[in-house]
Amino acid sequence: MKTIKIILVLAVLGLITGSAVIYSGIFSIGADVPHTKLVYWILEQARERSIVRASSDIQVPDLSSADMLLSGGADYNDMCSSCHLKPGQTESDMTIGLYPKPPNLSLADHEEEHGDDDDEATEAQKMFWTIKHGIKASGMPAWGLTHDDGRIWAMVAFIKKMPDLTEDQYQVITARE
């Protein structure tokens, strides 16, 4: 009987510790092959909590500048569109081979694909942090190593506007001089 009590106490402590690690956001995430639903859920929770924790103090600038939209669009087209797609596109050679599948940022509901219901500022903070720092073992690079914050904010500004763009508007805005 004493052994059963010890096992139960240890199991409860393990669950509490596991939950604390998952919800604290300190667990480094990564997956490159399909997982069970439970493992995938744990990894998604760890990713989301980690990004929320790390991005919570980021100050969001005014993202409505036309200059930001234009410079962010060109960078998005060059660096992001092969994975996160363009208006009118549903998949690419990259998206077919990536796991987990990257969100289609050209869709207005790309946040809902991953269960996000954040306000605009929180969503911008999370986008900025993700672009700057990347996500381990997901294919998402850390662009902050080669791009300054202004350039990353311009990509955030563009991504926020992209779902409203037609395919033709996208082509015009993303063209480099």
Image (cartoon, grey):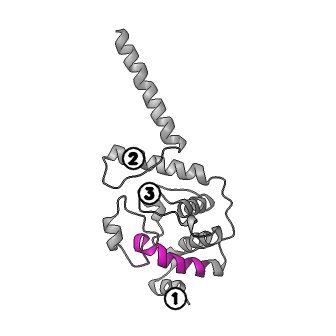
Quadrant of the drawing holding the N terminus: top left
Residue under pointer 3 = 114
Which of the numbered marks, if any, corresponds to residue 41? 2
Which portion, as a residue range, is magenta? 69-88
Q: What residue lies at 53% left-to-right and 49% top-to-bottom?
A: 50
Asked if residue 139 lies left or right of residue 61, the reply is left
Mark 2 Cα shell of 10 Å, populated few (<14), some (14-19), many (≥20) = few
| Local SS, label 3 | loop
Judge by depth and name the residue closer to the eye, 166 or 16. Answer: 16
Q: Residue 26's spot in the image, x, y percent?
A: 53, 44
Residue that extends furthest to the top in the rendered view of this protein: 1
Look at label 1 and name its amino acid: Val
Q: CA distance from mark 3 to mark 2?
A: 11 Å
Contact (Cβ within 8 Å) of mark 2 with mark 1: no
Reply yes or no: does residue 85 show up in magenta. Answer: yes
Which of the numbered marks, if any, corresponds to residue 130? none
Mark 1 Cα shell of 10 Å, populated few (<14), some (14-19), many (≥20) = few
| Local SS, label 1 | helix
Q: Residue 64's spot in the image, x, y percent?
A: 65, 75
Q: CA distance from mark 1 to mark 3?
A: 29 Å
Residue that extends furthest to the bottom in the rendered view of this protein: 177
Contact (Cβ within 8 Å) of mark 1 with mark 3: no
Q: CA distance from mark 2 to mark 1?
A: 39 Å
